[in-house]
Amino acid sequence: MVYADSMQNLIKENNASKKYKNELSIALFSKGDILLEQGNYRAAYQNYHAGKLLIDEKRIPAQMGV
């Protein structure tokens, strides 16, 4: 979990969330996996959901079938 937390903190502290959306989503999914293994289902879901929202932001409407 330290790796996923460190990756998130590094991106957020440097105000690089927009530039590194893909990397931030990977960190969120990784943290979600760890929390799921620990049985912390609510926190795991929150991380998975946040990661998915970042991925959805990157897509252009044509890619989403809109």
Image (cartoon, grey):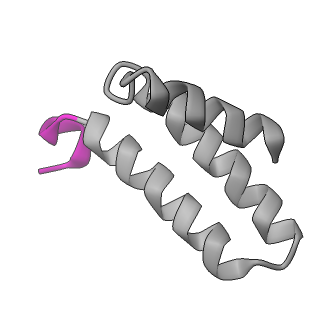
Q: Residue at x 43, y 20 (%)?
A: 14
Q: Residue at x 35, y 19 (%)?
A: 19
Q: Position of residue 54 (x, y in %)?
A: 38, 44
Q: Residue at x 87, y 67 (%)?
A: 37
Query: Relative to the observer, which residue lies in front, 6 or 56?
Result: 6
Q: Is residue 43 above or below residue 64?
A: below
Q: Position of residue 34 (x, y in %)?
A: 81, 58
Q: Position of residue 49 (x, y in %)?
A: 47, 63
Q: How many marks?
A: 0
Query: Relative to the observer, which residue lies in front, 56 or 44?
Result: 44
| Left or right, residue 16 beside residue 34 | left
Q: Is residue 38 above or below residue 32?
A: below
Provide the residue span drawn in magenta: 60-66
**Quarter occupied by residue 61:** top left
Residue 65 located within the stretch drawn in magenta: yes
| Left or right, residue 16 beside residue 45 | left
Q: Is residue 45 above or below residue 63?
A: below
Extreme residue toward the front, this view: 13
| Left or right, residue 16 beside residue 35 | left
Q: Position of residue 26 (x, y in %)?
A: 61, 37
| Left or right, residue 54 beside residue 8 | left
Q: Is residue 33 above or below residue 55?
A: below
**Quarter occupied by residue 7:** top right
Q: Residue at x 66, y 68 (%)?
A: 44
Extreme residue toward the right, this view: 38
